[in-house]
Each structure stands twice: as structure tokens, then as C-alpha cells.
Amino acid sequence: MFKILKKEELSDLVILFEIEAQDIAKKAKAGNFFTLRINEQGERIPLTIADFDRDRGTITTVFQKMGKTTHLLGALNAGDSIMDVIGPLGMHSHIENFGKVICVGGGVGIAPTYPIARALREAGNTVISIIGARTKNLIFWEDRMRNVSDELIIVTDDGSLGRKAVVTVPLDERLTEDKDIELAYAIGPAIMMKFVCVTTQKHNVKTIVSLNSIMVDATGMCGACRVEVGGETKFACVDGPEFEGHKVDFDLLMSRQRMYVNEEKIAFERYKEKSGVK
Amino acid sequence: MEEKKEDKEPKKRVNMREQEPLVRARNFMEVPYGYNPEEAVAEASRCLSCLNPICRKGCPVAIDIPSFVKLIKEGRFIEAAWKIKEDNALPAVCGRVCPQEIQCESMCILGKKGEPVAIGNLERFVADYEREKGEVQIPGRPKLSGRKIAIIGSGPAGLSCAADLIKSGHQVTLFEALHKPGGVLIYGIPEFRLPKAIVEKEVDYISKLGVKVVLNAVIGKLFTIDELFSEQGYDACFIATGAGLPMFLGIPGENLNGIYSANEFLTRANLMKAYLFPEYDTPIKKGRNVAVFGGGNVAMDSARVALRLGAEKVHLIYRRSEAEMPARKAETHHAREEGVEFLMLTNPVRFIDDGKGNVCAVECQKMELGEPDTSGRRKPVPVKGSEFQIEIDVAIPAIGTRSNPLLTKTIPDLSLNKRGYIIADEETGMTSKKGVFAGGDIITGSATVILAMGAGRKAAKAINEYLKWKYWDTSRFVGQ
């Protein structure tokens, strides 16, 4: 059992947990993820490691309540325990001093962007960060992101915080202005990563994305997470989750993410009935 | 089943009673019911008690078959179970999934003229009897040796190695990457062939012997092998991680929704209990028309799980003929009885999209057998112009596995072969790295439960030797 030490409701849908997981915290690096199973009947879902504290032996994750599992998870509180926590999984980010880099985090994707931006900055890069979401209350960690960025741009679709725009607008502007940006990082919904890649491709800037496909064991055993990169089938769990964005087939990723929409609906309806969640 | 009736003596093999094929094809309960005590005694009484029994030579872990069969004959069932457990920590599992027909039973003298003694059924009976009577005997702990051994992977190889080493007085830790111990016994073999409650009991027995089981531990990620030695004080380690990276067909459309590797399909159904969705949270596509590709036991398991999930039609598509199928005869027989349709000499060419990202059909072509290939089996060659389509909504390639590099790539001084499997001495499991032994599918590629258990036992013996002298000579088997 893995104890939740801290819970923060970053918005009504976005939750932060600090989970006691000594061994994982010791090994976690930017770009890694973990898998959890809440209880005996639970499914295994991958979540990002948004931060880790090696001294306290904790990992931090941020997730958005979407379907049954994430709602059930979000209903847990500090002091409660999660049955299984497995990690750190996936290849960690490749960090070096590239010069100037731009990090784009969308929605809950802001969370995993943070340790990467921090590591890039620590390696000596100039870091420009863009964070965006649909609306103001889905933006979080503005302060943290500001601390690890030389410049932070905030956008919301409805203009309730920062600029009224999608992330690709300021991204396109910066790439037009700053010809010395060597690398872009983009983590967020698949559709956002897709359009970030369309934008960066125009400017010929190499882009790393982190793919959030459906996983089961997340150790390479099942192939549920397969994605196509450069025309080749890869497993996001062990070959990734980070890939060169310009080579990723995002349409396939999005299609595969929708594989269980019906089942997700059934499970969620059933959960709502039982738990009284609206 | 095909029994020979020419003998006058009442020595006909006692078959296990089974659920009716069409009934069991719709539930996940075990297919055979197992013997009752009378049936077990009757079957054991067929044994001729040969002066020079060779059945034991057919067993990869050398169970004392003549002795345990004799104990059954005398009605001493519990003692029979203990007798088996001297050599085999998992009798309830092996009694169910071992290919006895090519091992112990193939050596039985009775088999020369009729049917051999049903050694597997008897093993199963006494193991179940012991468990159900609650008389599982836990031997006292031996004197502690002060040595620590890490075993990576809690499948059949890891479990049998752990059981032997703990009896030698060592401190043994079994690391498992998944959230349940048992490896392929839990995620791979379906409930109706091997009830998970039985696996849990057998693992429980091994923990009661004193083995510490650590779940959710992905070695290579959480700790490296070197860290186990240097930081955690282990004296030796045994790698038994299985093969476990699924192979796909490599044809167009294979990443469409509805196409599962057999590993994924079975893991969802068995480990995650997706057949109980939405009681359990893991979903699985319950296809109406399912195609399984391959001819091994895993293909049979996948086809039979698909039936039980409610498929109307399950096609088993294999590119060679039935004679070349690697599956056990009993498995193909069961699958066919339950209504799986066999399409032999047929090869998939591409999957077809329904326009929404889901598979809706598979295009196949007919094959014919040509000259023998390197495996000695006649090579299937496509028949021109024989393409045809089958409507499907779920497809399951069950064409084998490759080595999973997750752990091995974190051990730079470990020699691997070209296919990524660990190079190890067959007799001892010794690898190129001092103190590291390996066995099971991560050495051999996909094989059987009992062969993995045999490898686990051999490694346990070799680890005991190694702990005495810490002597390491790999010149015999490491090529480079």
C-alpha cells in the first residue's frame, strides 16, 4: 500500500497527490511515469511523475478527473492509501545544454513539463515556457513554472488568464522571433501536441513529445500502448513515452485513445450512480 | 477420447469428468472436475510398479512418481502430496499445465500397448486434496546460512528456485514487476485451465516457507542488479523474467483498434479480470467475430477466452497445417469441442479499417506446404490469387514473444545472444556476470512451465554451490 501524504485540489477537476514511495522517489527522473491500481477491482493507469523528493521519499502526480478511475482516485484524501504504485517507468528525458529551448505544457500536461523545464534549466539552457488550458482554473503551477523558466507565457482559450489564445499562437511567434531555439518540448492532450508539431515543423525545430497512450502492464509486455513513430510501431511504455514529435502519427494515437469510450462511459455511469457524483 | 478397448483386464484409464463443451465455452470455470478419491485410487492401481521405473526420467524436475502413485494406491493422499513436494513446489499447477504426454507419461510402460497411467491427473488430485483438506504441511525452517539471494520474476522458474533455496536456509527475496505474483501462471494461463485461487495458494505456500515476495518491483528501473549486490547485500541473484515482449504479424492495419497481442488480451482477461467488467474496471473488447493467429497453446487459450467473453464465432488461423501446430493435443481438442473454427494453411495479409479506426475484416491468403524449412517443418508458401476476407471485430496475433530488454539492457556486463536472450549455462544457469544466474524463458524463449521450473531448480543447486566457493568460470559457455 502506498500512502497519500498530501492532496491539493488545483481546481475542481485537477488534483495533486504527494505519494509515499521511497524507492521510486530515489530513482525517478524527469520524463518518467508510474502506474497505479487503486484497489483490487481497479485498472492499471499510467500517470506522470510531476515531481519527486528523494529525501522525503515522495513522488508528486497531478491528474485530471475524467472517468471512473480518476474520479475514484480524486475522491481519496491525504492519509488514504493506493494499493499498487509501480515505477519509475519509461525512458527519462534526455537532458543536455542545447542552448535555448521552449517548453509547452497544456492542461494537466503542465505537471510533467515542470521537472523537464527544471532539468533543462539546471543543465544551463535558456528556457521559455508556454502553459495553457481551456480556462483559468485549469492552469496551475504558474509560480513553479516561472521559477524554472527565463520567460513564462500563459494562455487560455477563453482569455480568463493570460493571453486569449491557444499555445501554438505564442509558440509560432517566438519561433519566428528567436531563430536560436534549438529544441521544443510539448506535453499535453494529443491534439495539442499534434498542432505544436505542425508549428515547430514549419520552423524546423526538433520537438519532443510525451505520449499518453493506454497501457496495462507498462513494462513492454502487452503492447496496448503501441504508437507509430517514423512509420515504425513502438511501445510508448518502454521505448517512450518521449518521441520525436515530427515523426509521430498523432491521428493513430488519438484513435487508439478512444478505443474504450463506450466501456469508459459504462464504468463512469455506474460509478456516478453508486457514489452520487454529479 | 480415444480409448483402446481390446484389453480384457479392467485397466482402462480413468478420465476426468469435464464440463460439457458448449456449457463451459460460456463460463470461466475449470474444464475438468478432477478425480474423486475412488477414481484416483482406481487410476493409481493401474500402475505396474515397474522394478526399473523410467517415468521419473521423463520429468524435468525428477518427481518420485512411483512412490507418490503407490501412496495414492494405498489411499495415503496427503503423504503422496508431500512426496511430490520434495521435488516440486507447485504440484497443483503442474498437474494441470504440464505436457505429461511428452514427458513422464510418454515413458510409462502401459503406454506401449494402451494408455499410460494418468500421472498428471493424479498429481493434480493429491495437490487439490491436500489443499482442500487444509493439511498443507510447512516444513520447519532450516538453520540460517546468512546468505541473501534475489530472484527476479515470480513465474514458475522463480518460484521453484525460491522454494529450493529457502530450504537451504538462505534468505530469499522474490521480486515481481506486476501487482500479483505468479508470472505467466497469473497473467497468461486462463482461469478455466488454471484457477487463480490455486496459483495464489501455491505462492502462499512458498511465502510460508519463508520467501519474501516483493510486488510492484520492476528490477532494472527500481533497482539495478548491481545495486542489489552492493547496496542491498545480496550474494547472488537469479533472473527469471520470462520472455514477455509480444510479437506482431507486421502486416498493414495491425495497430487498428480491436487488435490485441495475445499477451494483452490474456493479461486483461486473467490478471485484470476484464471478463468481470464492469465489476472490475479493466475493459476488454468482447468481439462478435474474433480471429486468433497462431497454432500454439497461447493461441488456443486466446481463442477459448474469446469464446467465453461471448464471441459468436472464433476463427483460429494458422499458416501451416494441423500436424505442425505446436499446441498440446488436449488443447486443440478442447478448443475444437467448444466451437473454435480452425482455418489451417491460411495467412493474414492485412487488416481492414471500418473508417473509424476499428478493425472490421482481415484479408487472408491460402497457403500450401512446400519444402521443409530450418525447423524441419514444411514451409508454407502462398497460393496465388487465393485472397479472401473474413469479417472480424477483434483480432489476436498469438505468434510468440521476444526477449524483453527492460532489465537486461541495464546490465552491461551480461552477455546476450543475437535475439536478446541471456546466454547461460544450461546445467547451472550461470551467466557471464559473476553471481548472476538466469533461467526460464529469458534464456530459451517461450517454453513450458515445467521446463522453467526445472531451470529454477538447477539454478538453485548451482547457487548453493556458488555460495560455498564463490567460484565463477564461464569459459565453458560464453562464446566471446
Image (cartoon, coloured by chain):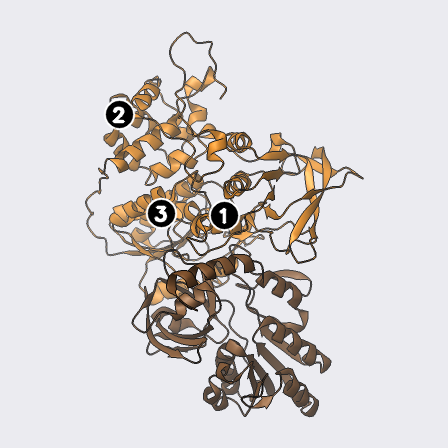
Specify the farthest residue to the right: B385
Q: Position of residue B101 (x, y in %)?
A: 46, 28
Q: Position of residue B240 (x, y in %)?
A: 42, 51
Drawn colour of chain B? Answer: orange
Q: Where is residue B280 in the image (x, y as percent from the top left)?
A: 42, 54
Write the residue at 36% across / 77% down.
Answer: A7
Q: Nearer the viewer, residue A178 or B168?
A: A178
Chain identifier of the residue bearing label 1 in the image: B
Q: Mark 3 packing: few (<14 Cα in 10 Å), some, or many (20+)?
A: many
Which element type, helix, strand or loop, lies under badge 3? helix
Q: Quadrant of the C terminus of chain B?
A: bottom right
User: A194 above or below B84?
Assistant: below
Measured Cα–Cα span from mark 1 to mark 3: 21 Å
Give the residue number, with chain letter if any, for mark 3.
B159
Write the residue at 37% across / 51% down.
Answer: B181
Which element type, helix, strand or loop, lies under badge 2? helix
Q: Do the residues labelled 2 and 3 touch (CB within 8 Å)?
A: no
Amino acid beneath label 1: Leu
Q: Residue B266 carries which label?
A: 1
Q: Position of residue B335 (x, y in %)?
A: 53, 33
> Does residue A98 show up?
no
| B375 left or right, relative to B184 | right
Measured Cα–Cα span from mark 2 to mark 3: 26 Å
Q: Which chain's colour is brown?
A: A
Q: Mark 2 packing: few (<14 Cα in 10 Å), some, or many (20+)?
A: some
Q: Which of A25 and A257 is in front in this view?
A: A257
